[in-house]
Amino acid sequence: MNAFLNWHALTWLGDSSLMMPMALAITAWLGWARRTRPVMWLWLLCVGTAGATVVAGKLAFMGWGLGIAAIDFTGFSGHTTLSTTLWPVALWLAVSSFAHRWRVAAAFAGWALGMAIGYSRLALDAHSVSEVVSGFLLGLSASGFFLWGQRSKPHPRLRLLPVLLTLVLPALVIPPGTRAPTHELIGRTAAWMAGNERPFVRADLHAGTRPSRRAAG
């Protein structure tokens, strides 16, 4: 039971209920000073592309059954993608006034956390290996591209405590373990767009079944 609860606690660190406020906090810090606003736009491009890719993949499977049965793939793991995109940048930003080696270490700590969150999705049987690995690679690409771009751009040099307080605030306001209803919302949207009574599920992928069509009117 304790291990089960611990996996849930870890997986919550990648849930949209926590990740979306964190994304807004990062955007606010990057856009605070005029000289770093170009960095903010690059960040929005990276996180937006990663998020849109996850949503598009889920819509494709839940609405039209577009998946790969051979590798048990129904779409990128959203928890893994978001955590691997956000945590490295959040931790890097927290130590942005420190020496370069500390910023690099913070980014790697964020990627390690994203990997651990991905593993929690496997432990909870919420995703397959292919979905977690692809989600990790997608998030790594998004955050890695953003951080690599900071080599030639004036990155913000913020104080550690204010940034940490801003990033921790959502966890203090949102009860730990709270799940955002994003998966269910995407499922209902996908079924409506495809004209089905319900979304496609993993069992449909492997059994070759499909939802019934929604009655006209």
Image: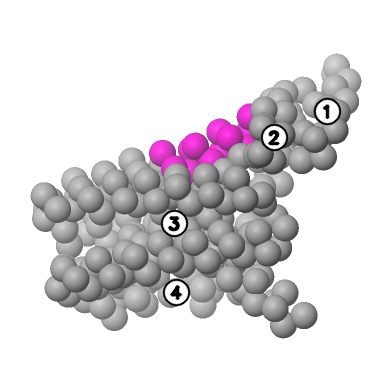
Mark 1 and mark 3 in contact (Cβ < 8 Å)? no
Q: Nearer the viewer, mark 4 or mark 2?
A: 2
Q: In this picture, which residue range is highlighted in magenta?
A: 49-62
The answer to whether any part of residue 32 appears in the image is: yes
Under mark 4, the amino acid is: Leu
**Magenta span contains residue 137:** no
Q: Nearer the viewer, mark 4 or mark 1?
A: 1
Residue that appears at 52% across and 45% down: 134
Residue that appears at 64% across and 59% down: 121
> As drawn, which residue projects farthest toward the front?
70
Disc 4 from disc 2: Cα separation: 42 Å
Disc 3 from disc 1: Cα separation: 32 Å
The disc placed on residue 127 is none
The answer to whether any part of residue 90 appears in the image is: no
Which quadrant is the N terminus positioned in? bottom right
In primary-sequence order, the first of circles 3 and 1 is 3
Q: Which residue is mark 4?
A: 169
Under mark 2, the amino acid is: Ala
Q: Tag 1's secondary structure?
A: loop
In primary-sequence order, the first of circles 3 and 4 is 3
Q: Tag 4's secondary structure?
A: helix
Residue that appears at 31% across and 51% down: 144
In primary-sequence order, the first of circles 4 and 2 is 2
Task: Tell me which corner region of the image, top left, top right, bottom left or bottom right, holds residue 202.
Answer: top right
The disc placed on residue 208 is 1
The disc placed on residue 70 is 2
The disc placed on residue 84 is 3
Disc 3 from disc 4: Cα separation: 20 Å
In primary-sequence order, the first of circles 4 and 1 is 4
Is residue 125 shown above or below 208?
below
Q: Relative to residue 125, is residue 11 drawn left or right?
A: left
